[in-house]
C-alpha cells in the first residue's frame, strides 16, 4: 500500500495519533521560520552575483560534465 493515497491517509492518521492533531501544522511553521528565501527558485542575487536559476544552470553543467554515465554509440543524445 506504500505510495498510494490510501497508504498516505493511513500514515497521516497514525502520525496524528502519535504526535497530535496539529503535528503537520507545527512542522510547517518551524520550516517557514527557518527558511531564508534562497534556493534554486530564488530571484535574489547572491554573493556570487547569480540568481538561484542561474546558479542551478551552472551547477547542473558542472555535474553533467563530471558524470560517469556515457552515451551509448547507437543512441546520440
Image (cartoon, helix red, strand yellow):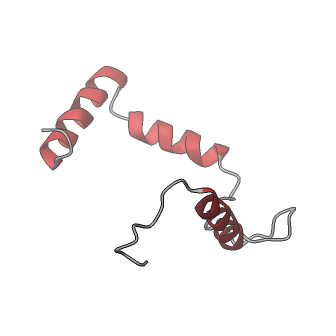
Task: Using the image, determine if residue 33 lies above or below residue 59.
Answer: above
Question: Residue 12: x, y in percent?
Answer: 26, 36
Task: Using the image, determine if residue 46 lies above or below residue 54.
Answer: above
Task: Using the image, determine if residue 76 lies above or below residue 61.
Answer: below
Task: Using the image, determine if residue 24 lies above or below residue 47.
Answer: above
27 left or right of 49? left
Residue drawn at x 26%, y 24% as measured from the top left: 17
Q: Quadrant of the N terminus?
A: top left
Question: Residue 73: x, y in percent?
Answer: 40, 71
Q: Quadrant of the C terminus?
A: bottom left
User: Please, which residue is most extreme toward the bottom here?
Assistant: 76
Residue drawn at x 39%, y 35% as measured from the top left: 22
Residue drawn at x 80%, y 70% as measured from the top left: 45
Towards the viewer: 56 or 16 = 56
Towards the viewer: 53 or 6 = 53
Towards the viewer: 70 or 40 = 70
Towards the viewer: 18 or 71 = 71
Rendered image quadrant of residue 66? bottom right
User: Please, which residue is most extreme toward the front here?
Assistant: 73
60 left or right of 9? right
Question: Residue 62: x, y in percent?
Answer: 68, 62
Rendered image quadrant of residue 7? top left
User: Please, which residue is most extreme toward the top here?
Assistant: 18
Residue drawn at x 16%, y 47% as measured from the top left: 4
Amino acid at each position: 500500500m506504500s505510495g498510494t493515497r490510501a497508504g498516505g491517509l493511513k500514515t497521516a492518521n497514525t502520525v496524528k495519533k502519535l504526535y497530535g492533531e496539529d503535528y503537520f501544522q507545527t512542522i510547517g511553521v518551524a520550516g517557514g521560520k527557518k527558511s531564508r528565501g534562497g534556493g534554486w527558485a530564488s530571484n535574489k542575487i547572491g554573493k556570487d552575483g547569480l540568481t538561484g536559476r542561474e546558479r542551478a544552470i551552472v551547477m547542473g553543467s558542472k555535474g553533467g560534465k563530471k558524470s560517469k554515465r556515457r552515451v551509448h554509440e547507437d543512441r546520440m543524445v
